[in-house]
Image: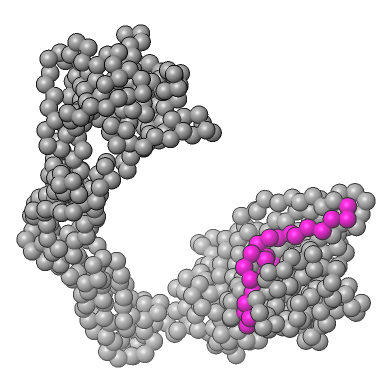
Amino acid sequence: MKSLKWLLSLSLLAAPIGVAGASVSAAQGANQLILKLNSKIMIKNGVSSMSAQPVTAKNGTSFIPLKSVAAQYGYTISYDAKTRESVVKNPLHEFRFKADRKTITRDGKAVVAPLAPFALNGSMMVPIRTWSNMTDSRLNLTGSTITLAWSTKPTANFEVATSKIYAGQTIVTYVDRSTNQTGRPFVNEHWTGKEEIFYEAGIHTITRQVQDAAGEWSDPYSVTIEVLPPNQPPVADFKVERETYRIGEKILFTDLSMDDENAIVKTKYTGRPEGDAYFEPGEKSVTLEVTDSHGLTGTVTKTITVTEEVLYTKEEFGRLFANVGDKFTVNGAAVLQYPSIKYAIQSDTAQLVRSNSPETLISEGIAYEDQLTGPVRFLFHNYNQIGYPVRMYLLATNRNGTTANVNTSSFGIGGPDAYVENTGKLSVVRYLQSIANNASPNWTAVKPGQTVVLLPELSKVPIKANQIYSAYADLYSDQELVYDVVVVAADKDPIAYLPWLSVMPRDGKHVRGTFNNANRTIEIDDRLGYEPKRITLGDRTMDSYLFGYDYTSGVNELNVGNFGVMYTMKLNHVAPNTVIALNPRGGVYTGAFLVNGQLVTVTNKSVLLNNSEAAVLYRTGSAEETVEIKFTLASGSFLPLAM
């Protein structure tokens, strides 16, 4: 695509300065000011007036009083007491002068004068040559006579704002850039070559003149543009390797679409099967529609024949070809017939706070409180039915006699959102990605008796009525701190209201409490992948639930579902060409996993709906591998899981 070509016609006002005998006339559109050395008399266009000070010679240079000459040009003058500068302005320009300083500011840019202005009997005196340069005036010196000439004609200018212009198709937009240093409005204009729609391709020149209220016409200003031939719609086309395929045979679709500008921006197939394989025989119609950058479209439809011969079943095809993070169909009953791999769990002393009861918020208050030190993982999951927007805060209070230091590191939020699957999935995705990114700790000092807000991201967005909110966060403190999970109206200060808030009652259905041993490691040395096998999670047998304590109510608590527990699974011997997939056994499941340090979402485009679906977590290559899978279960999902 060729770029626009611009043609500019300008009347140049600047001329060589100080040429003896040069003639300067006050022609139409110009002004002339005649001065004499050591005289206060100023003659503008034949009219005499008196300046504040005479033209004064100093160090071989003539100086004129700034205020007097600026008034002749129509400028206003003021004094900036803060910067101690004289400010000269008109609708187009601003000049700033300061006594005994050579640097002068013209429209915000510094200009260095040969000699500095100076004060004479209360008047700012500026070099006449500097003034002429600043105002684009012509200067002529003849003996003791000084003549300044400058134009007051308006300047025509415009921009063709449309970047690509097509003959007969494009509506052209023009942007006015014309200026007038006198500030007078434009009363007339004259265009040649201007069209709203150009119907002929080729080079076009557009010219404009403007006239101001004083009757002065500008010089012509021209822009040259290239009008392209009419844009043609794209041509849709694709091919497959042959016309006939077996059930479960992968089809290679090759897009052959073309556009006259190579500007296809959207491609849409209708009838193309997910995974590029059909699992029912018959005649299959596939339509390809392509759209170019101008919205024009092209379509093509082709027929593919699928025979009754079976190459792969739908489940076999998914195991072989589904991408990591995508789902495929499985026989849910058959999964339970796979041999179950036994495993042992190793736990460390990591602390977990699960703030999930009451899950449905019906009033402001303290959702949970405990006094903890060292590393703590927080899990928040709540549904706002208070009836108005609220914010959730994590407050830390130091009841010690010395300053405590606390940091926050890995963190992930889901929501606020109306759908629990979205909040549960996004919070785990962002939390695990934060772990993978090895987020740097953010330290906060908490003085004795002080209460601070931790995790400001937690309260950044209000939770509106009927919205759900989920979050995971890792913290560490070097001294014991009292942590409060506080929910208040969106406009309230949580620290100010903390003394007046009461602890929310448990809802009797969900989990609230502090749990130890919240990091679990599962290491399996079996040689996997040589036959179908399964690992079961969340079954309460091998993967038992954590016992804990609700500090706010004083009751023992069971972490049903082990939500918030961080699992690290090490599979030390996984065969070549093996697929590792996740199959939900209790209902809908969504979330994320870190597999060998890479984030895998479950699933890329959707969720796992039931036990007839599985999501690919990993595929090994051509040699045996060790695979590490790190995960925490997503809120709003159901257990158990089969891997």
- Region rendered in magenta: 448-472
In the rendered view, does 469 fall on the left or right side of 74?
right
Which quadrant is home to the C terminus?
Answer: bottom right
19 in relation to 627, above or below: above
Question: Is residue 444 or residue 287 the one in the foreground?
Answer: 444
- Residue at 67% x, 71% y: name it: 490
Residue 446 in view, yes or no: yes
Residue drawn at x 38%, y 20% is 125
User: Percent x, y for residue 106?
Assistant: 36, 32
Residue 582 relative to residue 497: left or right: left
| Residue 125 versus residue 151 in the image, above or below | above
Is residue 576 shown to the viewer in this render? no
114, above or below 420, in the image: above
In the rendered structure, does residue 455 fall within the stretch colored magenta? yes
Q: Position of residue 96 (x, y in %)?
A: 41, 31
Residue 375: quarter of image: bottom right
**Nearer to the camera, 381 or 425:** 381
Q: Which of the pair 5/591 is nearer the observer?
A: 5
User: Residue 108: where, in percent of width, then height?
Assistant: 40, 35
Is 401 inside the magenta-drawn segment? no
Residue at 28 percent of width and 45 percent of height: 183
